[in-house]
Amino acid sequence: HLCANAVATEAARRRAELSLVMPPVTYGYVHHVMDFPGSINIHYEHFIQYTLDICKSLAYHGFKKMILINGHGSNHNLVDMVARRVIVETDASCVFCSWWQLLQVNPGFDKQWRESVYPGGCSHACELETSMLLHLAPQHVRQDRIKSELAKTNKLGSKFIWGDLFGKGAMGLIEWTSQYSDTGVIGEAEKATAEKGRIVFEEASANLAQFIGEYHAQQIEPRQRH
């Protein structure tokens, strides 16, 4: 949530005349990670309903457009559902993304920072996420414990089952995290640097700021009851 909140806050700072940022929802759906001590799981239905209640409250008070910025892969589909329900259950419009998707707006941007193998080098506490933390909050990164690890599913060599933050195979397989990672790391964390974190933070924030302007100007089309 630190990464997502930082991107949202910086984008809003750049378009302060159009933007307000809510405090982040700091817990999410991590049931599959519970083999790793310290994980705090929120049931997926509770997460959807809690986040939806926040959005509905904003809609009640007159906000017509909302952007949900997600920071956790397993929340992505849940945030998708929240955005859809905001539209069908209120008079507001709502869009969503996971913050790293903002790095795919401009083709070829990955060449400016990515050195890890694709697919698999960027998935969880990886080159990307570790770089972001080294830039945003280096005091919280235990650099002596940074260790790369690729998911065992990626090592299978299947053309159907593989994953990366920036792509995935045709077949979805989300096992218990301990089945495909010994440490919880999924990617080449040892290739992370604070400079890479700065580069991707600036790109994600700038692209979100640009979208804020586009979304603000976008007309909400009327429904057609056939």
Image: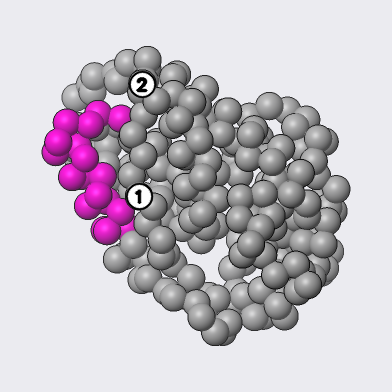
Where are the magenta residues, as a range? 48-65
Q: Which residue is mark 2?
A: 17
Q: Is residue 44 visible?
A: yes
Amino acid type of disc 1?
Answer: Pro
Location of residue 52 in the rendering, given as x and y in whole percent from the top left corner: 27, 51
SS of the residue at dot 2? loop
Q: In the displayed orientation, state which residue is furthest to the front.
A: 139
- Above or below 117: residue 33: below
Predominant SS along the magenta part: helix
Which residue position holds label 1? 23
Is residue 122 something that shows in the picture?
Answer: no
Q: Gap in Å between the C-alphas at discs 1 and 2?
A: 18 Å
Give above or below for 97 relative to 133: above
Mark 2 is surrounded, within 10 Å at the Cα level, by few (under 14), some (14 to 19) or many (20 or more) other residues, namely few
Q: Which mark is residue 205?
A: none
Query: What is the crowding at mark 1: few (fewer than 14 residues within 10 Å), some, or many (at least 20)?
Result: few
Q: Amino acid at mark 2?
A: Glu
Of pointers 1 and 2, the one earlier in the residue sequence: 2
Instruction: Answer with the quarter of the image where residue 203 lies.
Output: top right
